[in-house]
Structures are given as C-alpha cells and as structure tokens.
Amino acid sequence: MPRAMVGRPPASAIAAVGSKTAARALAATANVPVVPGTTEPLRDAREAEAVAQSLGLPVLLKAAAGGGGKGMRIVRAASELASALESAKREAMTSFGDDAVYVEKYIAGPRHVEIQVLGDMHGTMHSLGERECSIQRRHQKMIEEAPSVAVTPELRKKMGDTAVRMAKAAGYVNAGTCEFLLAADGSFYFLEMNTRLQVEHPVTELVSGLDLVQWQIRIAAGERLPTAPMMTEPRGWAIECRITSEDAGNDFLPSTGTISFLRAPGGPGVRWDGGVGAGSEIGLHYDPLLGKLIVWAGTRDEAIARMRRALLELTIVGVETSRDFHLRVMDDADFQRGAIDIQWLERRLPSLTAGGSTPDGEIAVAIAAALLVESERAGRLAASTSGASAPSTSDAWRNAGIRDGLRRR
C-alpha cells in the first residue's frame, strides 16, 4: 500500500490538537464548548493577572503542550499568580521542552469524562461511549470505569456527537480520545484531544465488545469502518485500577527494588495487562505503572465486588504497590454510590491512606497462599534435581514466614 494511503493520524491533525491552545481555538470554530479562558499562551504575569480578573478567581494555569498534570497550577488568590506562572512555565519546559502556559476558569467539582472515537481514512467517524476518569491524584488518573453513572443515554449521544465533530474538524484518523469536564448540571466543556490509544482503553473494549488495537491496525491498513453505529449502549460495566509501584501510606512515594514474586488474578471477567514479572527491576527512571487490573460484570455493584476480589488475589512481593489503596476505594461508600468528582480523591486521601496496609486478614491469607504455592514449586524443582524429598506443606508455610503471624490474628 502506498505510504500516503496508510490510515494513520495525519501530521496536520496531530498539530491541530497537539497543543492545548490550538485545540481550544479549533474547538471554538467547530462549535465545541470549551472552558472560558485564553487560546494563546500567556506573555507574562501582568497579562495573567488581567485575564484572571476578567474570569474571576480561582483560575487554572496549564501547559499548552502538557499532559498528566505537568505544568498545571490552581491559583486561588491574585498574589499567587506570578509565582504560580513561573513555576508552571519551569515545569512545562522541563517536561515538554515548551514553556507555553495558558489560563482558564477553574471549575469546582466537575467530573472528568472522556469519549473514545474511531475514524477511518474514508470519512467515517464513530463515538464508542464514555469513560469516567474522575478518580485522580494530582491530575493523574488512578481508576477508570465505563460507562459513567452521571451520563444518561441522551447525554452520551450529545457528548459523543460533540467528540465526533471535534475529531472531524481536526481531520483526525484512527483511534483518539476527546476529554471533557462534566458539570453537575449536565453541561460539559472540551479539554483536549489525545491522538493515541490511552491507558484506560480496556474498559471501553469490555463494554463495547470491540478490540481497539485490532481496529487501529485495520484502519492503518486502509480498511473501512462500518457505517452503522459500532456501539449504541454500553454492555455491562467495566472498571480499571492502575497498579503502581508507590507507597500510598507514605504520600505515594516511589518504591524501588526487584519483584521476587507476582501472581496475577484470574477468573471470569478479570483481565490483567501487565508489563512486569518475577525478576523485574523497578527503578526511579520510568513511569510507576506496573500493570492494569480490569474487570467486567453485568452491573456496577457486581464490577466493584469483582474488582475487590481480584485485588485481593493480586500478589506482588518485592516493592510496595497501590493495591491496598485501591481496595479501600472499592470499599468507600461515596465511590460505591458514584458520588465522585475530580477533587474527590484529594478530599478523601487521609482516610484512604491511613494505617498503611489493609487491616483485615484477607490480604495476609492471599499472600500466604501465593507464597505457599511458590515455595512448594521451588521444593519440587529442588527435589527433582537432587533426588531429595520435597518439603511438606507445613514446612512451606513455616518457610514462608507467615504461619505464626496468621495464628496471632
């Protein structure tokens, strides 16, 4: 196939939405609602102060080339603007090689909802529904789900049509994501468009029944998407937890070391997308994401219960992980009701991280079982090479160093 015919995102489309300020300007021309603010980078603190005064405090400073919360600062007082702008520009330059920063009105208590789109090089573009990404810490997503408890079928269609309109305005091709802030009254505002497949795409796959990676390849090969809607309503409920090498009980400090044992959960409706295993060295120079734990079930309540069970089965020895933190979120009454927004986790962190590891004995039992299996496997291997008998089950428990601890519970 000629190079020009490859169905990939055109460079012009990536340029059109690669900068957040350029994407905001494009959205305005496509009748896509955006958060009130500037469409050009700020020149200096004096201009920032003038814009903030016109918008009303608080405001949000954001890196034009940013992502993942880098180069982002909330400003609640005029006296903080100059220092916040300098700090945001410095972080933006360090992270992205571009210190351009713009300002927008800070909206309190919204949800972060994104729409997956898929378009071919023949002009067909589909929306594949929404993902709820409001569980965030320092603007980094930690838990995602599809669909969102806050999105009705009517709102889903409206947001989906808006995302398609934005993607078409950019001339976009292949898999992409439009991110929105969703206010409590149902109004929504375009944030940015990601010209790639995102970390949380598995939840969309599970409720749509579509393999998005396969469709990326098929579109790149020049295939046509079906003209009929590829998904009308989500099927069931999916939740994803990002398992990271961080110590949630110690302000999420990075945890380094070598993974000595890893047992991924299994069973119906459970998916583990991991990039590490026993023997993997976890250092400071890469993203802390170890793997993604995703579950699917018929209802949200069932999905939460299934995720809790899968988290209990997940065993990683050698580094601290966010597993226990995710368990606490699954048990939180607000989360179970779906009463969340993008500031919810920051408000709830003290209670969700207090006391270190989850106190109940289920965690200890899960670790004990995993270490027992590994100890017995090692014993059988040693016996097969030396001719000696394998250690007994009781020896394996004792060697794992946890039997007496379990007795004391």
Image (cartoon, rainbow, N blue to C red):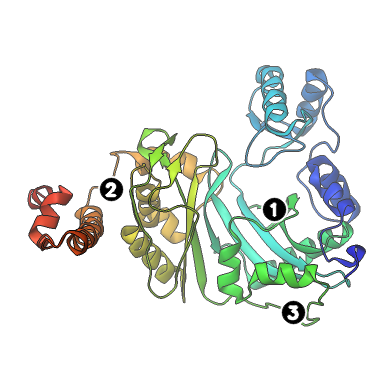
Mark 2 crowdedness (10 Å alpha carbons): few <14, some 14-19, many ≥20: some
- The picture quadrant where one finds residue 92 is top right
Q: Earlier in the sequence, mark 2 or mark 3?
A: 3
Q: Are marks 2 and 3 in contact (CB under 8 Å)?
A: no
Q: What kind of residue is marked 3?
A: Pro
Closer-to-camera residue (128/318): 318
Q: Earlier in the sequence, mark 2 or mark 1?
A: 1
Q: Position of residue 7 (x, y in %)?
A: 83, 66
| In this rendering, position of residue 409 left or right of residue 84 | left
Q: Quadrant of the N terminus?
A: bottom right
Looking at the rendered image, the disc whose residue lies closer to the viewer, 2 or 1, is 2
Location of mark 1 (residue): 180
Q: Position of residue 398 (x, y in %)?
A: 10, 51
| In this rendering, position of residue 408 left or right of residue 186 | left
Q: What label sits on residue 358 in the rendered view?
A: 2
* Secondary structure category for the residue under label 2: loop
Location of mark 3 (residue): 229
Q: Are marks 2 and 1 in contact (CB under 8 Å)?
A: no
* Secondary structure category for the residue under label 1: strand
Q: Position of residue 54 (x, y in %)?
A: 80, 30
Q: What kind of residue is marked 2?
A: Thr
